[in-house]
Amino acid sequence: MTSAAVDLEIVTDQPGGTWASVGRHMLRRPDVILATLVSLFFIVVAVFPGLFTRTDPQHCDISVAKIKPQGFGHPHPFGTDPSGCDVLAQLAHGARPSLLLAFTVVGASLIIGIALGLLSGFYLGWVDAVVSRLLEVFLVIPLLLAALLLLSLFRNIDAGDGDFATIVQPAIVLTGFGWMGYTRYVRAAVLESKNLDYVRAARALGASDLRLMFSHILPNAIASVTALVPTAIAGVISAEAVLAFLGIGVRPPAISWGIMISTGAPWFTGGYPYLLLFPLGCLLATVLSFVVIGDNLRDALDPKLK
Amino acid sequence: MLLGLFTVLLVLLLLHLLTTLAIQLNGNPALAFFGDHVPTAAQLHAVEVRYGLDDSCYQQPGNPCLGPFWHRLAEYAHGDFGTDLEGRPLTDLLAQALPNTLRLFVIVTITWLIIGMLLGSVAARFRGRPIDHSIRLTSVLIDAFPVFVMLVVYRFIFTVPLTTWARRTFGSDSIPALLFKPSYSEEHPWLTLIIPGLLLGLTGCAPFLRLVRAAQLENYNAEHVRTARSKGLSNAHVTAYHIVRNSSVPVVTAVGFVFADALSGAVITEGVMNIRGMGNLLWQSVQKSDVSVVVGIVTILSVVTIGVMLLVDLAYAALDPRIRLD
């Protein structure tokens, strides 16, 4: 009875339920709106790089090397790098691997994390024991060490060309060591809600295990998991940059901001600061906007910490 | 304790399976020993025997190769971690690298504790005021800067002008000149490590800071704090004994997890700043495809991480009498 009463109260208090109120909370904050616009802009860049530049990023002409930024209207608005590649074209095309990787990794880790969390929280017993042990094993190995080890061990294996093939190895590694957080949150939420009255009622009415898990228990866990997603996307984007910087992430001739940063950094003091500043600016703007969205989402979903 | 050992065993098994798969798909790592030189079959076989790669299972993709795994475990149990490709024992390499990594960790931990605890407590104390908002903004900004970006920016933008300035003002062997040196120097291990350690600590302190703030906020509204205040205890006393102490349990947990993060950060920091530590050693062995060193280091680091997590569990019981260890 009590839980029903509480539910009613929430419904009368905030018309439209939790998500509408989260939406209202987010839209009231100017920084969230700005961050959303920035991240949408970079998503558009990643999907349609052709909208922003007509130059082919792989077409590098050494005779026009090291042109400083000239502003729009010139053939090389953001200048060219030491081997004559157009910086704007590289920036626009470099967005795709990072963002594609981020969304693939977060999506795949969400699926694995939620599935394992649901199973271990719902069935407990040996399923839980196996999942918890697995979780611990993956937690103990730091992400970057694992990535370093695996990506260099498997670096001779050629996955082929194409957008997805260039990121498939980092994607597998980052997913393999990125699902644990979701599992823990989902498991905790399942444990909390699996014995609530309405779940027992549904079980008594003959609902199958799958139905109980997906339509009665999972919605309780979604809130805490959603708050993790934008931050996780930001984390993968910066992890990709680190891997590219170490030379084991997305590999040339594919372009990414991380590669541009590592090749541009030594030129900073030599009079070509834009070679570092442009890719760095893009990376930071993207990561920062996802972090801001995640931070506010966490607040909106967990009002206790406001 | 037993569970911890079991986890170590599983970690080892996982690493073994992955390296085995890599060897099976990639071809013989013993060839790495010879570099560009093409060995005779006898030479190749001798090297294979020396590094335990002579088992035929390494030629069959999909074979888990459990035989060499048990063999390696037995060697580890005797304290024999094998040698690198040049024949130096791994334990010697570690003995050289470990002090630098530990120094880095000391600086990182101090940075965390000072910045995280201080800013977190201040933010919780002045909740909702401008200072809270600015601390929070700082933590979001810190979150957005990956460690390597900080280090690259520092190394390529700041070190050169700073060193030149410090050398001109204070002389080339003065403390400030060494402090801003762009790479690690063997003679001044502490001084040249301070700035890399500070940067690494700074990037890790944002989640820590938020955790401190959240834990303390929960206590500010707790009943025992209200009771303490109504008894007339001073603000400082209440903050120190009733709020900070009680909010240290989640903070200690974080130290355990952030430790694993710092290990990752150490690889990048040591790589970018040329510090001869565990991370750098690992990085170089990865590039030389020196499998036995890599597996050895990752094993040791995992054991250390598990040890830290056990210590965290013990610290729980000491900090919160409600928690008992079975």
Image (cartoon, grey):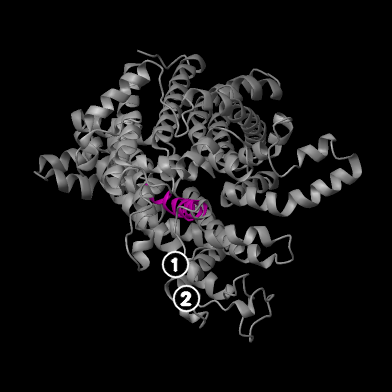
Instruction: Give the residue at x 71% y 21%.
Output: B234
Question: Front-most of B150 and B309?
Answer: B150
In this orientation, does residue B143 appear? yes
**From the viewer's perspective, is A6 left or right of A196?**
right
Give, as a three-letter code, the residue at label 1.
Arg
Q: Quadrant of the C terminus of chain A?
A: top right
Is A228 in the magenta?
yes
Predominant SS along the magenta part:
helix
Q: Quadrant of the N terminus of chain A?
A: top left
Which SS class for mark 1? helix
Question: How far apart in space, not on screen, are marks 2 and 1 (Cα)?
Answer: 8 Å
Residue A243: mark in rendering: none
Label 2: chain letter: A
Instruction: Give the residue at x 51% y 34%.
Output: B258
Q: Are marks 2 and 1 on the same chain?
A: yes
Which residue is the site of mark 2? A49
Ranked by sequence position, the earlier of labels 2 and 1 is: 2
Instruction: Give the residue at x 81% y 40%.
Output: B177
Which SS class for mark 2? helix
Which residue is the site of mark 1? A96
In this orientation, does residue B214 appear? no
Question: Where is residue A20 drawn, in percent x and y?
Answer: 40, 59
> Is B279 situated above or below B128?
above
Question: Front-most of A53 and B83?
Answer: B83
Segment tinted magenta in the rendering: A225-243
Cβ–Cβ below 8 Å for labels 2 and 1?
yes
Question: Where is residue B228 drawn, in percent x and y?
Answer: 61, 20
